[in-house]
Amino acid sequence: MRLILLATTALALSATAASAEEGMWTFDNFPIARANQTLGTSIDQAWLDRVRLSSVRFGGCSAGVVSDAGLVLTNNHCVASCVANLSTQAVNYAATGFTPRTREEELRCPGGTAEILTDITDVTDRVRAAGAGLTGQAFTRARDAEIGRIEQELCAGDDGTTPADRRCQVVSLYRGGQFKLYTYKRYTDVRLAWAPEDRAATFGGDLDNFSFPRFAIDAAFIRLYENGRPVATPTHFVWNDDQPVTGTPVFVSGSPGSTQRLLTQDQLASIRDVVLPMDQLIASELRGRLIRFAAESEANAFMAMDPIVGLENTYKRGLGRMRAMTDQGFMGRRADAEADFRARVAADAAMAEAAADPWDALAEVQPAVRELYVPMALLEGGTGIGTTSPGGGSVLFNYARTLVRAAQERAKPSAERLPEYGDARLGAVENALMAPRPVYPELEQVRMEWWMSKTREWLTVDDPRVRTLLGRESPEALSARLVEGSTLADPAVRRALWDGGLEAIQASDDPLIQWMLSIQDVTRGVRSDWETRVQAPTEQASERLAAARFAAYGDTVYPDATGTLRLTYGLIEGSNVPGQRFDGFTTFDGLWDRATGAPPFDVAPKLLAAREAIDGDTVLNMTVSSDTIGGSSGSPVVNEAGEIVGANFDSTVLTQRNAYGYDRDVNRSVIVTTGAVTTALRDVYGMDRLVAELRAD
Amino acid sequence: MRLILLATTALALSATAASAEEGMWTFDNFPIARANQTLGTSIDQAWLDRVRLSSVRFGGCSAGVVSDAGLVLTNNHCVASCVANLSTQAVNYAATGFTPRTREEELRCPGGTAEILTDITDVTDRVRAAGAGLTGQAFTRARDAEIGRIEQELCAGDDGTTPADRRCQVVSLYRGGQFKLYTYKRYTDVRLAWAPEDRAATFGGDLDNFSFPRFAIDAAFIRLYENGRPVATPTHFVWNDDQPVTGTPVFVSGSPGSTQRLLTQDQLASIRDVVLPMDQLIASELRGRLIRFAAESEANAFMAMDPIVGLENTYKRGLGRMRAMTDQGFMGRRADAEADFRARVAADAAMAEAAADPWDALAEVQPAVRELYVPMALLEGGTGIGTTSPGGGSVLFNYARTLVRAAQERAKPSAERLPEYGDARLGAVENALMAPRPVYPELEQVRMEWWMSKTREWLTVDDPRVRTLLGRESPEALSARLVEGSTLADPAVRRALWDGGLEAIQASDDPLIQWMLSIQDVTRGVRSDWETRVQAPTEQASERLAAARFAAYGDTVYPDATGTLRLTYGLIEGSNVPGQRFDGFTTFDGLWDRATGAPPFDVAPKLLAAREAIDGDTVLNMTVSSDTIGGSSGSPVVNEAGEIVGANFDSTVLTQRNAYGYDRDVNRSVIVTTGAVTTALRDVYGMDRLVAELRAD
């Protein structure tokens, strides 16, 4: 036993303490010296500050400021919802591209919000103190309340309330190892400045997604506005559209969504055995329903396009994760890393006593996770470990839920509310609710029916919660009745219900509102169970685990991704492992070669028409070894000089293991180059005015 | 380490050597003494012979002869395809039930075949000798050829050919531990004698499937014919429709399809990690497509009904297996059993040398299984470990494949053919091909399109095999072209192509035939890889494993299910474990209580109309502790006196672990009682003539 442990220590180290290009680092703990040493660069704190202030979070994506007039580069797939919301079947910007001839023609994205991280403040002690001595739901609620207070107090302007252009968020890092207050400058007027034809961005569709070689101009521009005018952004990335070179060091600055690298083996097993299978199986059925729905008519195809793309992306990512979880070599290295960590803690009596075996404590939570994930995901959502959420993605469902819950919660003091309805967060909730966007009843029906049907199936028909949900109606009949009867698609109706508060909600004759009211006891009950039996004990053990990790490995560890700004670094290079062999570059000539004319390998019409004008050697996409994950989409890829050379938009299927650990041999992010963007703007879409703006520096 | 092994031996024993009611026993190795001792019964060899000769295999189901005129009881779901094939949207027997007033009105099931096992002969030495000294594909082909010769020689009648009413099959038992020739009396004229309304048999639909309490009259009768007349069957089960009593010993005689209990831990891991996930994920998408397809029109709903029921059944069973595979307690006991087995072999030098570590040999095969399962399942099928098969269940695809392959294979000597086209098996192939049955192009299109799309997705678009399959066409376009252009739905066309042989096939202008010809190199290549790298080394190691098992545990072990006749035994009783608590009986009164009027909880109209005539206390369904699995559907449930008291039709979700091991606490088979059948015949469907026939003894 001893021998085995010793023999694996070298390997284990590399999986527990970050090494080489591993790590999604926070800006306040970036390993400047090690990055410089690894890459041969010489960045400094001032460089980091400029990069941070040029980095943007937009929706669930990342982006970068690229001109002094608030122009921001992101991925086309990050503006797909905006494009869909601005389109009709007749004027469909996904088909034609969005190419405003003047700045004035740039259109506002409904509900679009962008943020730039301005400050990070340590609030660990305050959060810890609030939960001291408590357990179960009392623990989670006390902390949530304190977090709400922190966000409100530290974010307040001179008048004691949070200014509309500021957002504050307490972030749990290292799974409770630290709590930091992130303060953002917030932009609620975000306009679409350019999007290519959808097919130019999605060439190869789902088949080429998560793969390389790749040939996708997955880029778009938005512009930040304030007071009806473009924002002045003197701090921004300089546009560098030179041809990229293998081996160049690059940095990727963005907001990766979520990783599970600090989870214990037992926690990962619950995800492998329960979370991923349900999420993927039911998503696969929805995919089948939507594919058939889209085939029924042109109108349906238009409605379902964006949802299918999103669903297929999530599904394929999940498949990559399932494969990672069943890759015996990869998961064996993860197990070795845990064994090394445990051995280090066990070898130090003080460390062991302080840690109080968090592995065992987390193991004891897993039966509850396995029991409660299914109802929590289907009825309440917010599990933090899976993709399933109630309502099946129905827009109307989410409107109704927000209206009902906000009304119920606003009747209480901020500290006693569900944390997402605390005063500091209410403005964002209201903005999202009121943003005008199209609602397609046929699509809503597909989503609601599917979700109700899967909830009944997975919880079983005799579960009292299912009986409350469905009454004596079938999923088909109930979903039809609620969707047909609801008027929540009308922003004026939502406004009236929001302003009217609980009284208006209770008096509403909207069937969806009434039904949503009727299921609150059940859904809140599920959440309460989860908080008591899963969330609280997990957080408490995870904090001890985090402290033990700092003790064992010092500051050579980085936190799991949490949807907040991180910096990662690596080299422009290809890959040469089994199942993943490629050079690091593709060109426009490669695109012409791969095109067959049949979807999804048909070149977008405007792009195809411009073929003669385009230099075929121009690099279109490239791969880098930096450590990214979903949410990193749109991340500016920056060279040592702080110039932007591309935007991250994807990674490979094998790279999906990065949820659980970085693997230098296979981890490759896929980048659309600035050169390709310049080419598209200039040679395809007649957007010379943007090229001029980009090259103004 | 030593301590742990000792401590688990008691547990391990019960999982490796059969105990209590465990085991799907062959009729030539049934543990008469132990069964009698366990149950307090006194059956003997003559009893076994009568039961065997009264037991029928029908399609993929089991059944039992219940009168002296060839009347056979099975499940309604076992005749569902027959009912669908005999129905049109206008005359839909699934909706009305099939209630022939006279024997002459009983209708022939297209392609229906029934068999009764008449002889078992040991041929182990001949099969072994044929493969001696060979490896890889040479090994599998030599054995296949010898098996073909055995089946042909030992089955031949006076004229040297196999009589039409006889079928011979060499069965590999204990995964190569024994080879037995099973000889069957074969009936190719099988008529439908009664089927209830579909809803009477499927009350609760997919939601109640694999559960208990249950309220389903899942019973139907077929009748065996020969020379246009009902077969005289003096040996048959006596009909006993008394109310059942808890604790009564019963025997279940049927043909369970497939279990994987003798697989090693490494083999099971491949099924858990690769086989089940792909099978289930793609089935779930087809389910979504079919659900939406069925919702589009009445006509589509009619076409899709039987396929959806079948698919949902397979999917739910797979889900139960996924859960078993991730049940740490259950799988831990399986691992303990293997550890015990390995320790026993290791402890005996002679045994260890003879076995030559088959576990290690099988472990070495698993990378090939993980690599090749996906292409083998999608392009060729017949993996023996999963449910995916090429063509997506398209009838036309299977016609074309059979025609093309049979033509190619018949051009060779029998011993050199793919084994399923050997002379001894060709008659059955031809019968199945020529049976008239409806083909619905819209449904064919859904199936083919889905299958092509999933094949492209899972093998990836750049796989040369996918390029051969699709050429430059999309799955949508290619499947539409093949389905629309094919004339194989016409039996006369199939007859002409069969009779015309390879020349006719090559000259055919049927696009499906030509396409099928074009993919043969690819699909046969995949099969050849599988045989070489998976099948042959697996069979060779499994034989050593089987020999070691006999050496370690004697004849207290039973073979995995292989779709051949087995006898299992147990008690009529309920269940009382977490997640599965119920009494062993349901009644008609319980049915009325559970009914809501909304599908699938609507009582079938004729059944509901007869409510007043029915004694509500009559037991409808019951559970028994016998060891069954898919294929056991329709199995006669027989008491000590050899009287039939019910027909097995289901088991519970938890029982799905029985693929990997019997668990006395949870294993419950679900039975429709003879009393319920008598009630339905007499009080609901006016079938008194059948009641009289049943009660004639």
Image (cartoon, coloured by chain):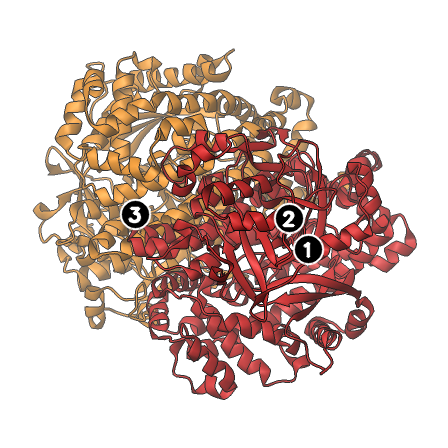
Chain colours: A red, B orange
Question: Would you say B544 lies left or right of A538 here?
Answer: left
Give the percent coordinates (x, y) of residue A449.
38, 63
Give the percent coordinates (x, y) of residue A268.
65, 50
Looking at the rendered structure, the kind of residue marked 3 is Pro
Q: Nearer the viewer, mark 1 or mark 2?
A: 1
Frontmost residue, B32 versus A211:
A211
Q: Quadrant of residue B15?
A: top right
Q: Which mark is residue B443?
A: none
User: Dot 2: what SS?
Assistant: strand
- In this rendering, the answer to whether B588 lies above or below A218 is below
The answer for how far apart the CA atoms under marks 3 and 1 are is: 56 Å
Looking at the rendered structure, the kind of residue marked 1 is Ser
Residue neighbourhood size for the residue with mark 3, other residues' Cα within 10 Å, grouped as few (<14), some (14–19), many (≥20): some
Looking at the rendered structure, the kind of residue marked 2 is Pro
Residue at numbered disc 2: A636
Question: Would you say B288 lies left or right of B194 here?
Answer: right
Give the percent coordinates (x, y) of residue B669.
41, 52
Question: Would you say A427 lies left or right of B123 here?
Answer: right
Is label 2 in contact with label 3 (beta carbons under 8 Å)? no
Residue at numbered disc 3: B307
Question: Would you say A457 lies left or right of B541 here?
Answer: left
- In this rendering, the answer to whether A121 lies above or below B687 is below
Decide if residue A635 is in sight here: yes
Question: Which quadrant of the rendered structure holds the N terminus of chain A?
Answer: top right
Establish whether labels 1 and 2 are both on one chain: yes
The answer for how far apart the CA atoms under marks 2 and 3 are is: 50 Å
Frontmost residue, B522 versus B365:
B522
- In this rendering, the answer to whether A39 lies above or below B179 is below
Q: Nearer the viewer, mark 2 or mark 3?
A: 2
Q: Which mark is residue A54?
A: 1
- In this rendering, the answer to whether A364 lies above or below B609 is above
